[in-house]
Amino acid sequence: MSTLSGRRAVITGGAAGIGAAVARSFAAEGAHVVVADRDGTAAQALADELGGEAWEVDLLDTRALEDLSLEADILVNNAGIQRVAPIVDFEPEAWRRIHALMLEAPFLLIRAAMPGMIERGFGRVLNLSSVHGIRASAFKSAYVAAKHGLEGLSKVTALEGAPHGITSNCIDPGYVRTALVESQIADQARTHGIPEDEVLQKVMLTEAAIKRLVEPEEVASLATWLAGPHAGMVTGSSYVMDGGWSAR
């Protein structure tokens, strides 16, 4: 039997990048995947490919999530955005937007999914954090603060979920080969005053011992193990996949 057979997995930001890789990996292991994304067309296309279902949702509309009831054996909080700017130039609304999507929405989704998990005596909460959940970088105040908050939320979820068979963990990759990372290159070049073709080596990979981007499928492999039956004693942890960045 496949390791996730019979499990219902909800994956936010699931239509592309890390989310799509996780959805494909979960489906290959027998899970029924719910691809949650604001891009309903892309979510439906992937859901059709995997025999799952699409959930078109704007997670920035946090008020709409307050009374949500979410059926999920596995919840993957993956949706994210980025803004690169010095604190003195960081627009307050951009700060709030990042925190709404990457901290408030995960809280509300966990809150919506936990009652069903408690009732069934099983749950897996996977929070796609970042090496920036345990380390800081200049010009990313909102992102770093949100990811640090997500790490704390994940640990509290682990403590409250433990009596009910619910685990909660963070995955902390370095820079992953996704559209989100690619979209940062121009901002990073402008902020650091360097050409765009130098950003990868001089900014993104400078702290990593292994000088390459993380592949989405590598993140998905770890997520699939954490969601499965062999990770029942793994909770409240942060799994770093950063090429040695945090070893410094």
Image (spheres, rainbow, N blue to C red):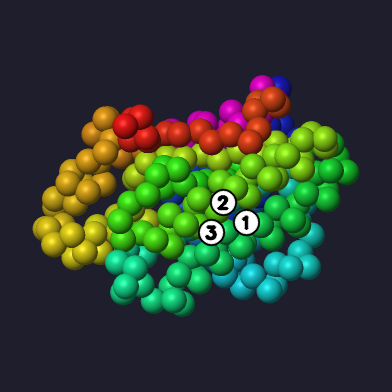
Between label 2 and label 1, give the one nearer the viewer: 2
* Residue 150 disc label: 2
Please tell me whether residue 223 is drawn above or below residue 87 in the rendered image.
above
Q: Which x, y percent locates residue 64? A: 70, 72
Which stretch did the figure color magenta?
217-230
Q: Residue furthest left?
A: 195
Between label 3 and label 2, give the one nearer the viewer: 2
Left or right, 167 with respect to 128, comes to right
- The answer to whether the residue labelled 3 contacts the one labelled 1, judged by CB atoms less than 8 Å apart, is yes
Q: Earlier in the sequence, mark 2 or mark 1?
A: 1
| In-front residue for pair 198/178 | 198
Q: In which quarter of the image is residue 122?
A: top right
- The answer to whether the residue labelled 2 contacts the one labelled 1, judged by CB atoms less than 8 Å apart, is yes
User: Which structural element holds mark 2?
Assistant: helix
Residue behind mark 3:
102
- The answer to whether the residue labelled 3 contacts the one labelled 2, judged by CB atoms less than 8 Å apart, is yes
Q: Is the magenta stretch mostly helix, strand or loop?
A: helix
Say which residue appears at 78% left-offset and 49% top-offset.
114
Residue type (three-letter) at the residue carrying disc 2:
Leu
Residue behind mark 1:
106
- Disc 3 to disc 2, C-alpha distance: 7 Å
Q: Which x, y percent locates residue 212? A: 26, 36
**Can residue 137 be spotted in the picture?**
yes
Residue 29 inside the magenta-drawn segment = no
